Amino acid sequence: MPVLTTDAESETGIPKSLSNEPPSETMEEIEHTCPQPRLTLTAPAPFADETSCQCQAPHEKLTIAQARLGTPVDRPVRVYADGIFDLFHSGHARALMQAKTLFPNSYLLVGVCSDDLTHKFKGFTVMNEAERYEALRHCRYVDEVIRDAPWTLTPEFLEKHKIDFVAHDDIPYSSAGSDDVYKHIKEAGMFVPTQRTEGISTSDIITRIVRDYDVYARRNLQRGYTAKELNVSFINEKKYRFQNQVDKMKEKVKNVEERSKEFVNRVEEKSHDLIQKWEEKSREFIGNFLELFGPDGAWKQMFQERSSRMLQALSPKQSPLKMWAQHGGFQPDNLHKAS
């Protein structure tokens, strides 16, 4: 990553335009025309070679305390952050968010190193430089993207882009033969630290891919990629395709089992409902039965009434003459006595 180198003009490595020397009166009269931070996010951030800062006003060196107060009022504080940004992820975005919000009025420039520099000093990338440039342009915190950013920062680079501060996490970054490539920037008072996001990094993502290589190779074969495109051997291709077929069969069996369980559950629910309804109907039936045929039920009363009517029909009431006769009324003997 970047390192600030010294030149003959300044022992601290800071360009004269960024030093503490007071500007001349003629330069003070020139107004700042530095690009302002993006306000409407309707387009990707521009590239630096398309929208470079052509401001002719002196770029006075700021302290961090001054920048946090929102000064200077006539121009934004220009913050620079750089990196490889391979497989752009939330950790990258959070670091850029911190760099953007370090000061009240910040213009965030992001430098992205080329493939040649990255492969030389760090290693092979998953995304090529054009893809990495485009990923940064579409991050909401970025105001400007610098393509083919240098691996080591020079005074000329800082002066060209009128950089006030460089933002990066505070962990010493060893590269290009240095124990901490940001040491000179820290000594010049131009370094502002950001915090790393734990649990996410490009290396972590690549580790997952390597660990689960078989899974991703099988997935991409299913999606139509050829073994040649995936750099998969003939034997491995057949193995992966066979495993895919086995997984399909497992999925079918699983679906059948789930449907069977669902059917059984529906039958069980239906049976429960039927049993509950049967119990309700049976209680109603038993109640009606007892009401009709019980010891004091309507059937007994009806039977008694019908029995009484039948007895009355079979044994009609006696005539008055017969009743008079039964009680000692008209007798033949009485007739003889009377004559």
Image (cartoon, helix red, strand yellow):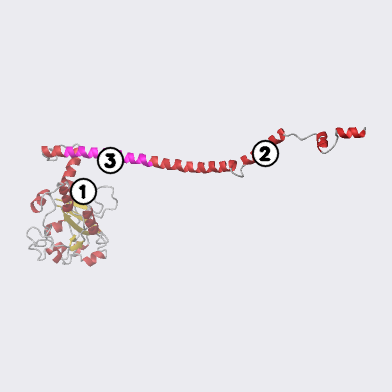
Q: Residue 159, labelled with which disc?
A: none
Query: Which of the two labelled residues, at mark 3 and mark 1, occupies the earlier sequence position?
Result: 1
Q: Earlier in the sequence, mark 1 or mark 2?
A: 1
Q: Main secondary structure of the magenta part?
A: helix
Residue position marked by numbered label 2 in the rendering: 305
Disc 3 to disc 2, how far (Cα)? 70 Å
Considering the numbered disc 3 on the image, is that residue within a helix, a strand or a loop?
helix
Quadrant for the N terminus, please: bottom left
Label 1 sits on residue:
135
Camera-side residue: 325 or 41?
325
Marked residue nearer the N-terminal end (3 or 2): 3
Give the x, y percent position of residue 101: 25, 59
Residue extent of the magenta highlight = 240-265
Position of residue 105 in the picture relative to residue 11 (left or right): right
Please indicate, yes or no, whether residue 131 appears anywhere in the rendered image: yes
Relative side of 18 to 40, left or right: left
Report whether 307 appears left or right of 22: right
Which element carries disc 2, helix, strand or loop? helix
Q: Is residue 248 magenta?
A: yes
Among the 4 quarters of the image, the one containing residue 162: bottom left
Residue type indicated by callout 3: Lys
Label annotation for residue 254: 3
Place of residue 156 in the rendered image (x, y in percent of width and height, measured from the top left): 12, 58
Q: What quarter of the picture does the C terminus occupy?
A: top right
Q: Is residue 236 above or below residue 110?
A: above
> In this view of the protein, which residue sits in the foreground, 193 or 219?
219
Q: Nearer the viewer, residue 196 or 296?
A: 296
Residue at horizontal 91 percent and vertical 34 percent from the top = 337
